[in-house]
Amino acid sequence: MTTKASRVQTSLDLYEKAGQLIPGKTQLISRRASSFAHPVSPIYASSAKGSRFTDVDGNEFIDWVNCVTAVILGHADEVVDNAVKEQIDKGSLYTVNSAQEIELAELLCEIIPSAEMVRYTKGGGEACAVAVRIARGTTGKDKILFSGYHGWHDWYQAANWLVDPVTDEFPFSGIEPIGVPQALAGTALPFVYGDLDGLKKLFEENKGEVAAVMMEPMRSERPPVGYLESVKQLCHDNGSILIFDEVSCGWRISLGGAQEWLGITPDMSVFAKAMSNGYAMGCVVGARDLMEPADRMFISSSYWSDNVGLAASVACINELKRRDSTTQFRIIGEKVRAALEGAIDSVGISATVTGIHTAPTISFDLPDPSIGPQINTLFIQEMSKRGIHSPTSFKATLAHSDEDIAITAEAAAESMKIIMRALEGELENLLEAEVKREPFRRLVT
Ligand SMILES: Cc1ncc(COP(=O)(O)O)c(C=O)c1O
């Protein structure tokens, strides 16, 4: 009998093969092996159910990534999947329109504070691009000021031409802007989250030219008090539209998004990912007077009417409501935080759990901060060996159980013991993986 060289050998073999056929090897940068502990972490899955997935080598993992938050109820949720199966039997795409477009629009307008009118897409970056098109078309201005990550489209990636990607990691280290027209340089300008003076300066330098501010309103921390309100005021003083990109922060924190949780209503918003629990779907919502001019803009695509995404979204949102997801995510998140804090205390390592309840994150307090990337990779590596797939930040679904949390905390404690040894001088021997690469900076915590 031959023994496998690695417990994720099939993943490694497939990844090598992918290199021959697929440039970049994966479709999402965050799915590249370099985003985890390569070659220890799994790279390919064969099935997923609830809080767990099974990789192509047959190893089971508790999943704290959940498709970079796109899965919110749990993998292969029965309610959503049954709605999709029923829909498939009735037709996945119609020649004429689907009445579910209206049903979902009504649901979104009911729960999202900024929603009066709605357009659909199949993904988050695409929805951001539609929002930018509408903002430019509605205001008659071209420039976009942005903070955060907003996808792969030209309007946004043009910002990469503002820096030397080799020497300057702001805003996307390691990814070159080639392929994006250089003529777009200067049409999308980044600002640093929280720096109101910097944003004011950008408005002054581009007076009368700013169509919109596109920003992630928050990620893992609460915004500084009054910050978002001041951004909104700045936008309105300059005749610009405030767009919240809630592709990542929406849904878990509150059914109506971060805007509902924080009590601030932007002019327009973008949602995607978790709105359909793993089926392709995205949307742009906004105030009637800003959205209505989209009627005259070229914003059109065949699969935006796809019934599968619509059915999945309606079922997912209704399930989130029925299960009181906002309360449940608080309960689960606080349990995860307490369990991780318990692991830290039991080991006696110098670390804290930071972040709001939807993103409890372990921060190691290191004598030499420059070894942070190695230590984080070591943590991911050791967790992976123990059947836990997670970076240092933990994003739950409603399917994560007390047992999942307890197993995770136990694995975290064992992994932290290994980190203690690494800090005592054994790091080189213990780290089997390549240091995890940060693909881009998001400009927002
Ligand atoms: C805030 C934000 N906007 C946009 C996107 C892009 O979404 P998608 O990958 O569905 O195109 C992402 C994806 O991570 C995101 O986090």
Image (cartoon, grey):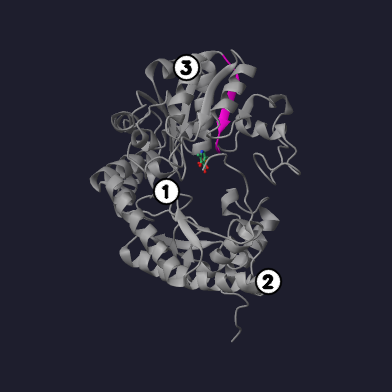
Label ID, residue 428: 2
Amino acid marked by disc 1 = Gly
State the separation of the CA atoms marked 1 and 3: 36 Å
Q: Residues within 10 Å of mark 2 (few under 14, many from 20)?
A: few
Q: Picture coordinates of residue 283 (x, y %)?
A: 43, 33
Query: Which residue lies under the disc numbered 3?
Result: 236
Dot 3: element: helix
Of the image marks 1 and 3, the number of the one nearer the N terminus: 3
Residue type indicated by callout 3: His
The magenta region covers 141-149
Distance between the alpha carbons at the discs numbered 2 and 1? 38 Å
Going from the N terminus, do you reach mark 2 or mark 3 first?
3
- Identify which residue is drawn at 31% across, 30% down: 99
Residue wearing tag 1:
278
Where is 36 relative to 239, above or below? below
The first of marks 2 and 1 along the sequence is 1
Q: Is label 2's Cβ within 8 Å of ligand 1? A: no
